[in-house]
Each structure stands twice: as C-alpha cells, then as structure tokens.
Image (cartoon, rainbow, N blue to C red):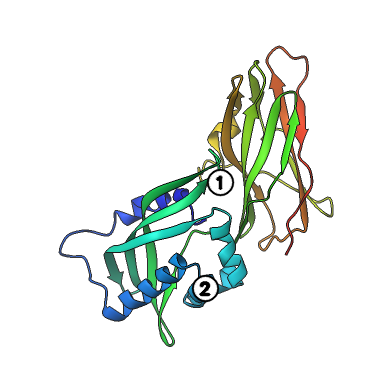
Amino acid sequence: MRTVARALALVALAATISPGPARAALAAAQRTALQHYISALVSGHYDAAFAMLSPDERRYFQSPANFASIFAADRFKIDSFVIVGSKSDKLGTVALVSERVEFFDHARQTPGRVTAKVLYGILRGPSGYVIKDPLHPWRALAPPGVTGMANGLRVSVRKLSFYTGRLEIVATFANFGDTAVTVLPYGRTVLRDQSGKTFPLIASRLGTLTDKTLYTGLRLAGSSQYTGFLTFLTPDRFLPKTLSLTIAPALTDGADAPFGISLPTFTLGT
C-alpha cells in the first residue's frame, strides 16, 4: 500500500543506504527514469507511471486501474520529492527518495501530511531503465458506508487491500456506550463472498499480518475507539463481487452473553 505506514515500514531498509562516500551516485539515465516515474505520480498520470514499472510489477498490478486504486484508496498525493541517496549492486540500484505527501488518515478520518523516505528499485529493462515500486497491494478500495452496530459498539470498514493470497481490512471499532466492551475478533469473525465461501483470519506473530491488539483482545472504554486491521487468507488473485463481514465475539462488562456485529454486504465492482 502506498500509505504512510508503507513508507515508514521502509525506514529500516532505507538505513542500509549509507550517506558516506561509498554511496553510488545514480547514472544520468537512472535519475531521469526515476524522476519521470515519480513526476507521473505527482501529476496523477498513473497510466504513464504504470508503463514505467518493471515487467514483474506490471504483472503484479495487472492493470493501470488497479495500480491507480492504491493511491485513490488513501487519497494519496505526492506534493514534492527529492532523491537523497542510492546504492547499487549486481542486481540493480535502490534509490532513497524523500517525499512530502498528502493522504487520508483512515484512523482519524481526517486529511494528513507527512514527509517520508521511500525506496525505489531501478532496473535495466530491454529498452531502458524501469522502476520497481514494492510492498503495495495489487488493488485497494475504500468502500463508503460499510458500518454495523450492536449494543453501542460500531464497526466501520475503512479500507480493503488485496495482496497475493490475502485481504487486509482496516476497520474502526467505536464504543458509543458508557460501559467498557471487550472485542475478540479472532474468536468467531467470518468473512464471506457472494457464493457463501468463508475465509479464515491469519493469526501470526508477524505484525504486518496480525494486529496484536485485536489478536489479544481489544478492550474499549466508554466513548473510545480503535482502528486496526484484520487479514484474511484468500486465493492468490482474489476478486470477489461482494463481501460480508461479521465481527464476533464482543462482550459488554457485566453482560450475560457475548454478541456479534454483522456489517451490510458491500459490492466491490470490477
């Protein structure tokens, strides 16, 4: 996902690009290719940027529309950029770019701005240099109005990110009551597609696949909320027509029984 979270996830990798004299300067053709690619993103010409990706990246995204969707889902826009470093080996070149970006903060539901350092690969292609822009979903959506509520607890789907073999759902859990609620979505949460097929949650020690707070149990005080993610195991190129999500169990302090929240079925289109 091209989001602030994605950019920050690259910080550790970016640190491997030494600022010292051992750093390899970009060749003029490499710098030009990278500048053209990022400039296409700045101007919103995602079809032009897609055409500059490496063959592997183009196969991954499948289409310019899928590629553009990852920016639309986060309302992501690069305002300015500066190439600040690079490192080369026999496999290619990695460039470090400082970007000033605008985005939509799904947790706070407000616009945001940040300066982040992002890595791009620069590879030699059959007719010039091509770009590798990794770690994105191959498709992303921010479906409007997908909200369910029960016993004062509201769950709102903010974003869907389709990766190879998994679907990540960003959701906000908001307690509108005065009594604390505990949510254990790794208990009986169910995701279904239009055929009724269900998909299991991925429970892993990897923070990129499993939200630790939701896995161990989210306790929400009255009038508080939390935005996290749930990752489901899916076919490699999962492209459902509709999805429905039921979050369970949740238990209000002092209540006799847990409850679940069923969100309305939402259509994903093509």
**Secondary structure at numbered mark 2:** helix
Lower sequence index among marks 2 and 1: 2
Where residue 104 sits: x, y (%)?
52, 48
Determine whether, in the image, residue 258 is placed left or right of residue 174: right
Measured as percent of width and height from the top left, residue 233 is found at: 66, 51
Position of residue 214 relative to residue 70, above or below, is above
For the point 52% across and 59% down, the residue is 136
Residue type of the residue flagged with mark 1: Leu
Image: 159 above or below 219: below
Locate residue 196 relative to residue 68 in the image: left or right: right
Badge 1 is on which residue? Answer: 209
CA gap, disc 2 and disc 1: 27 Å
In the drawing, does residue 143 fall left or right of residue 30? right
Question: Badge 2: few (under 14), some or many (20 or more) residues near its Cα, within 10 Å?
Answer: many
Question: In the image, what residue occupies the spot 63% across and 29% down?
Answer: 174
Query: Circle 2 is placed at which residue position?
Result: 50
Q: Amino acid at mark 2?
A: Phe
The image quarter containing residue 202 is top right
Is residue 53 shown left or right of residue 34? right
* Depth order, front residue of 139/18: 139
